[in-house]
Amino acid sequence: MVRLANGDKRGKEVHRPLLLDPKVRAWYDQRALRSRLSADTYLRQLGGSLARLGMDPEGLTELAKHDPDALSEALVGYAANLKREGRLDSYIAKTFDGLRSWLRFRRIDFDSFPRLSPTRGVTLERERVPTPEELRRVLDRLSPRGRMVALLMAHSGLRPGVMGSYGASDGLRLGDIPELRLGRHPSLTVVPFVIHVPARLSKTRKMYTTFGSQEAASALLGYLDERRSLGERLGPASPLVTVDSFAATHEFQGKKGAGRFLTTKGIVFEIRSALSGAKPKGVSWRPYVLRSYCSTRLLLAEGQGKIGRDLREAILGHDGGVSARYNVGKVWGEELLHEAREAYKRCEPFLSTTKVTVEPSEADLKRAILGVLLPAEEVAKLEVSKMTTEEVRRLVTERLQGAGGATPDSNNSTGSVGQLGHAGQPPNGSTDPAETVVRLTELKDRLANGWHYVTKLPNGEAIVRRSGTGGGGYLPIR
């Protein structure tokens, strides 16, 4: 049994000798089966509390069992001393967790801990989410490795513990990015790129999928190029984030530090320094604020209809409840993966620290073209994503013919999609439609032949109207 010296309050390793006690070791090992981080935290709390109380584990156990009032008084004094040192109630209450766990393990029912008034979030009162411009300044202070880590937190929502676990025993590997190609120069087959977070690294203990942005892709490939240029042999099992490139060079392969994961603390070490140097006056930033950035920016995108709530929660690795469990909580098929990628791509302008031009998808272009001529409710009923370009062109042409003065079905002045083929011909017996869609390269010739410009379409085409068919007030060419 180990007895701690009375008054030994601040030794950094005061808790380690406790493991020489077989009972403490058994308690620690039981906690470590689920989480070594939790076990170390509880051991540290127990050691610090015992040092302040001037007790050892067995003495504490006996006092709680035979004289709980005396232990309660000792804990009141313990808490009062910490308050006089300026500690918050929330901090003091947290230090009792190790004592509680130890007494539960010894099957002692003790509930006379001091009553406190912990207030949550006091230490975060000055923290707010950075703007994209502020994040840009943080990124400018980072090394290639730090920039990649920061962007994966801020754009993909990755937790630091996903990239490097406690104790540096595990983390994301290059193989968890399936679209990454490791050749002479690493590349990505598609962007936004997929990141699979294994269940063992997920906080919810469930595998989930997130995405990397164009900005994150550039940082990732630049970091891997640097590692490869220094001789590191990259493979699917290689850590995504490893020790510095110097230790990973060919000369040091197989030696201490080469090709190893970083600890969670090591993952954020450089980021913490960059945040401290870039933060505005009166603002407090922790590394975890980068994940808050991702959540907030996706929330803004959700407010503008760019992404759904279930998908946003899934990308952040949250347990989204029953709805998300049914919608996005299973293994994603190709169709859902495609839709999720497109939704994330629409969110990139909200996440990026640089200006991003998002090209509309083919389905969006088709929907926009049809929206020029068809009512919104009619477009909503069409399976636009499954329509071919020729089908869209034919539908637009039929509607334009119907708008040229012909009489569609007498019971429907606008004509339904199925009735557009019965439209009449334009005036003067011409077989050409009153309006038509042309490519912009053909626009000049059409105008020279007496046609009038109506409007430009999003796909590089335009609508023109024959002269003499009415409908003045043409829009200027832009």
Image (spheres, rainbow, N blue to C red):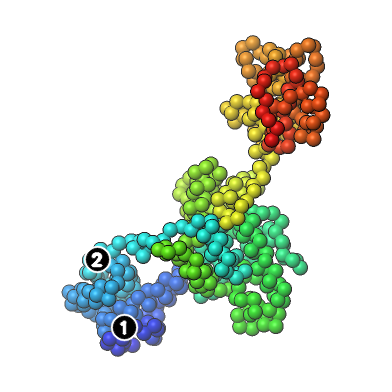
Is 462 situated above or below 191?
A: above
Three-letter amino acid code of the residue under disc 1: Lys
Q: Is residue 117 left or right of residue 269?
A: left
Q: Compare residues 450 and 271 and report the one nearer the observer.
A: 450
Q: Label 1, secondary structure: give it.
A: loop
Q: Position of residue 92 (x, y in %)?
A: 29, 71
Q: Position of residue 4 (x, y in %)?
A: 31, 87
Residue at 51 percent of width and 52 percent of height: 297
Residue at 67 percent of width and 42 percent of height: 361
Near mark 2 (Cα within 10 A), the count class, few <14, some 14-19 or many ≥20, is: few
Residue 93 in sight in this render: no
Near mark 1 (Cα within 10 A), the count class, few <14, some 14-19 or many ≥20, is: some
Residue 477 in sight in this render: yes
Three-letter amino acid code of the residue under disc 2: Leu
Q: Compare residues 410 and 48 and report the one nearer the observer.
A: 410
Judging by the rendered image, the residue that carries numbered circle 1 is: 9
Residue at 51 percent of width and 75 percent of height: 167
Residue at 51 percent of width and 63 percent of height: 159
Q: Position of residue 8 (x, y in %)?
A: 31, 86
